[in-house]
């Protein structure tokens, strides 16, 4: 079978030749003696028109074939210079691989994204989701390419872990204990000695701590894997299962970290614009007008920089615009993040040096003893897509911070070892993969950029 992508790529080679294609019917209209099928084979964003006539032995069957049916078609590829599409197939043989009844849930009319979410196993057959999931795949490839070209080592960090890297307590517990008959210790607590690992475990909220151990061996590493958070936030930007990319760089500080993040984002944008022009044009026309112009601009200009303290000064002056009023020390909500990046800077902006009390234990304490060397990258339309920091590399300061926060030192022995044995300054960040896909496609809901979304009260398929 020849793919539609290949026909577009090398059309001179196939015009006038007999070829065979396979795909699914997008539409079929017939008159008495001939008909037209629009075929999509998933390999390219364009469809292929098939012309068939009553010379086909099964003409009557084909004339009635429904949207969604799978066909194998043999015929001659003919140039159609006057038509919208450059060529069509004049069919000499059409085999029905699998018919589809007329109640096929995807018809030619446009369906809402909400409706398509209810049929997540069929939605990849629509234009929108063909575009989203091909671009998602390309972004993943571009990210690997970016890091591999710079000699970063890809580290596979574990999915089941015993730690809460972010300290936010938003973990999904993993257990083989029978919840209807939990074994108890003498003092009435759950007896984890009976559990599979002999202790409480959970799905990872971040690969960072494990990643750091490899950065202290390879210098530059990255992770790229599934991440789980039992955050009870029902928003368009939060999923319980999402993918995260976490580079970690040794002999590097917060500035180096931001340079890496900015270069990575620009690289991905350029890669996708170059390698998925049809899909990106589709998003620009039907999902988010102005997307292409905006991305081109982002790829070719400097990101903004502002400290948390400066950002708070700006936000406090505009508190009347917010549901949640800000003051120094509070965490930024999405409304504040979006205000900064959409109204003040009008481009991606790094916010740096947050108060230590609203950030994770591992971030490097600044000289002021109040803030840490943290950075969040905020982008218009979404808010935070990257969170990162320089890490506390001083053993004593890290222990002190862990004690302040009541963390159990024994759980973090391996992590403290890194500060004992050849410690060096190092930094890293986490890019939320789905938020990155949203940013590059203009899609407004995280549920529409992950094939089978998991969110509060929703784990279908
Ligand atoms: O800011 P976060 O929590 O940072 C970390 O996990 C660090 N360990 C990263 C590091 O320094 N190695 O998460 C990083 C990013 C966020 O900026 C956001 O894009 C994404 O992960 N993210 C989510 N995406 C979708 N759904 C959720 N529930 C998310 N939580 C975080
Ligand atoms: Mg964050």
Image (cartoon, grey):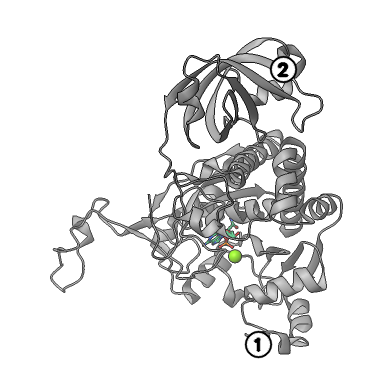
- Residue that appears at 62% across and 49% down: 248
The percent coordinates of residue 381 (x first, y second) are 70, 64
Q: Is residue 72 left or right of residue 298?
A: left
Compared to 71, does 422 lie above or below?
below
Q: Secondary structure at mark 1?
A: loop
Rendering quadrant holding ligand 2? bottom right
Is residue 286 visible to the viewer in this orientation of the structure?
Answer: yes
Q: Is residue 339 left or right of residue 29?
A: right
Residue 199, by quadrant, is bottom left
Ligand 1 is within 8 Å of the C-beta of the residue at disc 2:
no
Label 1 environment density (alpha carbons within 10 Å; few <14, some 14–19, many ≥20): some
- Residue that appears at 53% across and 40% down: 125
Compared to 276, does 19 lie above or below?
above
Q: Which residue is mark 2?
A: 78
Q: Which residue is mark 1?
A: 325
CA distance separating discs 2 and 1? 65 Å
The percent coordinates of residue 279 (x first, y second) are 69, 42
Q: Nearer the viewer, residue 72 or 57?
A: 57
Q: Is residue 123 left or right of residue 49?
A: left
């Amino acid at each position: 079978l020849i793919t539609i992508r290949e026909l577009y790529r090398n059309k001179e080679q196939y015009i006038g030749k007999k070829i065979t294609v396979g795909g699914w019917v997008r539409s079929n209209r017939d008159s008495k003696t001939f008909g037209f099928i629009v075929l999509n084979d998933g390999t390219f964003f364009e469809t292929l028109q098939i012309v068939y006539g009553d010379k086909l032995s099964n003409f009557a069957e084909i004339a009635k074939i429904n949207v969604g049916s799978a066909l194998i078609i043999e015929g001659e590829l003919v140039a159609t210079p006057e038509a919208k599409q450059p060529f069509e197939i004049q069919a000499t043989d059409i085999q029905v691989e699998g018919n589809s009844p007329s109640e096929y849930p995807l018809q030619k009319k446009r369906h809402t994204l909400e409706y398509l979410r209810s049929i997540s196993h069929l939605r990849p057959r629509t234009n929108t989701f063909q575009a989203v999931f091909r671009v998602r795949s390309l972004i993943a490839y571009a990210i690997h390419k970016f890091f591999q070209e710079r000699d970063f080592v890809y580290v596979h960090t574990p999915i089941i872990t015993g730690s809460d890297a972010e300290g936010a307590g938003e973990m999904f517990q993993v257990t083989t204990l029978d919840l209807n008959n939990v074994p108890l210790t003498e003092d009435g607590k759950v007896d984890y000695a009976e559990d599979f690992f002999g202790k409480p475990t959970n799905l990872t909220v971040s690969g960072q701590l494990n990643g750091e151990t490899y950065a202290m061996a390879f210098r530059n590493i990255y992770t790229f894997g599934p991440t789980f958070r039992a955050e009870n936030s029902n928003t368009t930007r939060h999923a319980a299962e999402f993918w995260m990319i976490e580079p970690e760089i040794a002999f590097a500080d917060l500035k180096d970290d931001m340079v890496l993040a900015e270069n990575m984002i620009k690289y991905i944008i350029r890669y996708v614009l170059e390698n998925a022009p049809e899909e990106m044009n589709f998003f620009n026309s039907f999902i988010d007008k102005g997307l292409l112009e905006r991305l081109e601009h982002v790829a070719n200009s400097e990101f903004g920089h502002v400290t948390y303290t400066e950002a708070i000064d700006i936000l406090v002056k505009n508190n009347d615009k917010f549901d949640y009023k800000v003051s120094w020390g509070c965490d930024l909500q999405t409304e504040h993040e979006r205000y900064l990046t959409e109204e003040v800077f009008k481009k991606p902006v790094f916010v740096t040096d947050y108060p230590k009390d609203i950030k994770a234990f591992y971030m490097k304490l600044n000289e002021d003893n109040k803030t840490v060397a943290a950075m969040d990258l905020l982008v218009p339309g979404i808010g935070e897509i990257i969170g990162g920091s320089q890490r506390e590399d001083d053993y004593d300061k890290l222990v002190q911070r862990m004690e302040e926060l009541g963390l159990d030192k024994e759980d973090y022995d391996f992590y403290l070892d890194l500060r004992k044995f050849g410690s060096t300054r190092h930094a890293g960040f986490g890019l939320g993969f789905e938020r990155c896909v949203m940013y590059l496609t203009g899609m407004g809901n995280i549920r529409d950029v992950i094939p089978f979304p998991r969110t509060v009260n929703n784990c279908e398929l």
